[in-house]
Amino acid sequence: MTERDPRSDPGRRRFLVGAVAAVLAGGCGRVHRVLAPPELPPEAATRHLWPERPDPHRWSSGGLTVAWVGHATFLLRLNGTTILTDPAFSDRVGLRPLGLLTLGPRRVSPPGLALHELPPLDCVLLSHAHMDHTDRPSLYRLPSKPPMIVASETSEFVADLGFDEWQELAWGETTGIDGVRIEALQPKHYGRRYPWDRNRGYNSYLLSKEGITVLFAGDTADTDRLTQALKGRRVDVAMLPIGAYNPWIQNHTTPEQAWRMFRDLGARYLIPMHWRTFQLSDEPIFEPIERLTRAAGRAAGRIALDSIGQTWSLPG
């Protein structure tokens, strides 16, 4: 009988993929299990996951237009400036020990846009260095290489990818690109790319241009840091994570926590993210949006973009 190479064992691969998913979701700290509320709607099993298709080449240059590509990847046009956040277009995200295959979770739903469908970009925004937010293969394959904004002590992960210009921002620092004021804020998360890595920066960003203000939170757990930093300031749109909370609540908000943060910010609209794209945690893939909608109740009309590939606009 021929002995099987343990490296080819599918169970071993599943274990490695699951381990990487735990790292991506914040499994380096203590585990707090979050049980789903009872009586969640059973509709998730019957829903399809194929995205809609935005057409950014027809977007207006005025106001705000946003398309959800998937996970924390959004294409925004803010009063004429085109911004891509946390680009993740790969089929898998995670470790690439030999540079040939990726050990990590596979996409549940394909991207709402292909890389070649992207319009020319004015800025790429990276919230932190976790592999589902700083996906090096996606960044390398971007058809344009505009200026990039990254968190402090993370530029080494993008310096060799063909971008001519990048800037690190620490909490409280600001910069400007094409008339957009970009301010780095402090969420509640962590910044190590690997379990053995040192601590690095992790940012939320406030984007402002010509009277429209957008908060891109990146990853965050439940916190009042963003509310305190933005107290008395206008927020038109808050982009907040709602998934990967079970059992990683120490690093990611539950949908109910995200809704409370949105209300505390006084924002006009909520764009949920960090769900439906990669299975990073235990909750069912559609549970986050069901719980968010239930938490919002009669105010659910203030939730924008609940489907990958959707486009939503706010006039100037």
Image: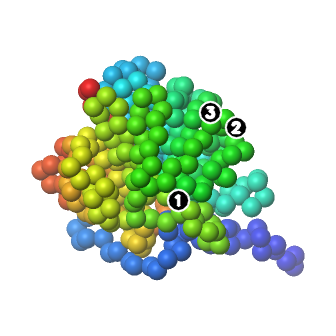
Binning the other alpha carbons within 10 Å of mark 1 as few (below 14), some (14 to 19) or many (20 upward) gives many
Vertical placement of residue 116 versus 161, above or below: above
Residue 171 is situated, as x and y percent measured from the top left of the image, at 44, 55
Q: At which x and y percent is residue 299?
A: 15, 49
Q: Secondary structure at mark 1?
A: loop
Looking at the rendered structure, the secondary structure element under dot 2 is: loop
Rounded to the nearest angstrom, the CA distance separating label 3 from label 1 is 22 Å
- Of the residues shown, which amino acid type is indicated by label 3? Lys
Q: Residue at x 26, y 26 (%)?
A: 316
Q: How crowded is the residue under tag 2: few (<14 C-alpha within 10 Å), some, or many (20+)?
A: some
In the image, residue 147 lies at what x, y percent? 57, 35
Disc ID at residue 201? 1
Q: Nearer the viewer, residue 284 or 101?
A: 101
- Whether tag 3 and tag 2 are in contact, CB under 8 A, the answer is yes
Q: Nearer the viewer, residue 45 or 146?
A: 146
Report the residue at 35% width, 37% height from top.
208
Q: CA distance from mark 3 to mark 2?
A: 7 Å
Residue annotated with mark 3? 145
